[in-house]
Image: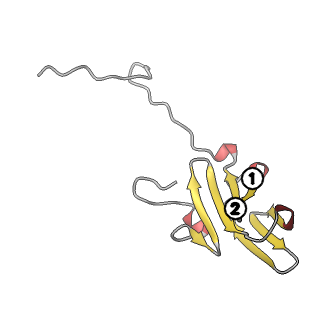
Amino acid sequence: MSDVLGFDPLRNVFGYANNAVGGFEIQRTQNGYDVELAVAGFRPDQINVTLDNGVLTISGESERRKFTRTLSVPDEIDPESVEARVEHGMLTLSLRLHPKAQPKKIEIRGAAGATNVTAAPSAN
């Protein structure tokens, strides 16, 4: 997710520009990344997806053609939570961040230790 200044620290890890690289469409989500790849003409049982040592490999083979695509992913991706589905000729992969890499909401306390600080109404 880009911060206020439009900087995405994982942009260089994925190496993408304008959300597309090597035929992949990559979208940053609150919990990780969604990756899409066109696989028209391939059935789900003709597609293999593996994640090994930070490299995502997608390959497909049918009677008439085959393909292989690879993508380096950041270490923060939880390999146990990767999900894949094929719908209307598009393979969609959900790459979720490892739970320890999730952004943490920091509680802000007031001087007296109260968590909710409200301003007094102004006397105009």
- On residue 88, the disc is 2
Secondary structure under the numbered disc 2 in the rendered image? loop
For disc 1, the marked residue is 82
In the image: residue 18, left or right of residue 120: right
Quarter of the C terminus within the rendering: top left
In the image: residue 35, left or right of residue 52: left
Q: Residues within 10 Å of mark 2 (few under 14, many from 20)?
A: few
Query: Image height check: is 79 above or below 21?
Result: above
The number of callouts visible is 2
Which of the 4 image quarters holds residue 13? bottom right
Query: Image height check: is 94 above or below 21?
Result: above
Q: What is the residue that sits farthest to the left in this orientation?
A: 124
Q: Mark 1 and mark 2: span between their CA atoms? A: 20 Å
Query: Image height check: is 63 above or below 85?
Result: below
**Labels 1 and 2 touching (C-beta < 8 A):** no
In the image: residue 44, left or right of residue 36: right
Which of the 4 image quarters holds residue 25? bottom right
Which mark lies nearer to you, 1 or 2? 2
**Callout 2 amino acid:** His
